[in-house]
Amino acid sequence: MRWPSRLPIDPFIAALLATVVLATLVPARGEAAGMGRVATTLAIALVFFLHGARITPRAALAGARHWRLHVVVLLTTYAVFPLIGLAAAPLRPDVLTPELYQGLLFLCAVPSTVQTSIAFTAIAGGNVPAAVFSASFSNLAGVVLTPLLATALLHDTGAVQMSAGAVGTVLLQILVPFALGQLARPLIGTWIDRHRTLTGWMDRGSVLLVVYMAFSAGVVAGVWDEVSPIRLATLIAVVCALLALALGLTYTAGRLFRFDRADRATILFCGSQKSLATGLPIAAVLVSPQLLGLLVLPLMVYHQIQLAVCASLARRWGAREE
């Protein structure tokens, strides 16, 4: 089925919004919530197993020689973004509630996307091999760096506490499945590549389950009473400003360090995006179910806006190249 091109929203985002509405109207309670948590644990492991099985280190190494480009992207993703998040502290509590500000900080710790970064780079006429390596390495690093950064950024808030138990959970639910996926790549890599649609649905279905359980827990705990329409509109404005700043900084860095046009496009699209598919499962591991819904809301908003804005930018860059 082809998604109608006239609709201004990505179909996956539409499914996410529908899942939020479902969780609001019919939240999981009692025994159903317990079963859902078990299913969520398995789904998170599946997500990272598929991430590990998809990434092809040998193919990605074709773009590894552009080390200056990769340094810029990694610094933007894991240093500049967190610094911007910390600089936004004066926004609380008048502009953003403490919970939404925590979500903004977590958003700043999430790795770049893989598929969309590469796709937008290709549309814009950018350096695709470099985008493959940069986006893949960002996610490889994010498996370790995102939990560590999230813990450091949110430690004072109490939302994330990297205890010995939490470290064990991260290892079992994120690192071990990811490593198993990498080890299984020689055996199942061909099948994964041939059935990208099926594995994509499995990936997205796992994320939808995480979202449903997160928002169900929030509804049961009554946390959504804290998010008024005005607060939501303010959050959207703040997220738009963050994306505009990220795009401006990556574009400026590309010109400042005298990269050619193809490399500037790669820096722009790999350095400014944040991965919902990776960020949500990591958040589900680190954060209690009652706090998870509000924590991931900024990331969900950012993801939809970045898709719309970066798709338009990629088409413009591609038209100029032609």
Image (cartoon, helix red, strand yellow):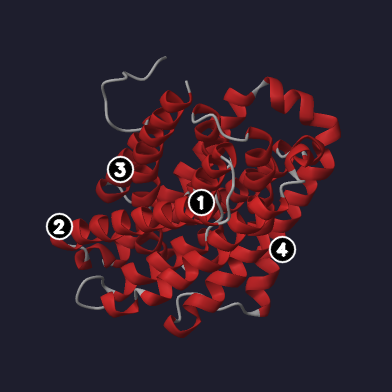
- Against 117, residue 91 (above or below) is below
> Which-is-in-front pick, marks 3 and 2?
2
Expressed as whole percent of the image width and height from the top left, the position of residue 219 reads 29, 59
Q: Quadrant of the N terminus?
A: top left
Image marks 4 and 3: residues in contact by CB distance under 8 Å:
no
- Residue at label 3? 22
- Residue at label 4? 171
Image marks 2 and 4: residues in contact by CB distance under 8 Å:
no
- Which one is in front, 136 or 206? 136
Expressed as whole percent of the image width and height from the top left, the position of residue 39 reads 56, 48
- Against 50, residue 111 (above or below) is below
- Against 261, residue 231 (above or below) is below
* Precedes in sequence: disc 1 or disc 2: 2
The amino acid type of the residue labelled 3 equals: Leu
Residue at screen point 39% across, 65% down = 103
Residue at screen point 20% across, 61% down = 234
Q: Residues within 10 Å of mark 2 (few under 14, many from 20)?
A: few
Q: CA distance from mark 3 to mark 2?
A: 19 Å
Q: Secondary structure at mark 4?
A: helix
- Residue at label 1? 255
Image marks 1 and 2: residues in contact by CB distance under 8 Å:
no
The amino acid type of the residue labelled 2 equals: Pro
Left or right of 111? Residue 158 is left
* Precedes in sequence: disc 4 or disc 1: 4
Expressed as whole percent of the image width and height from the top left, the position of residue 171 reads 71, 63
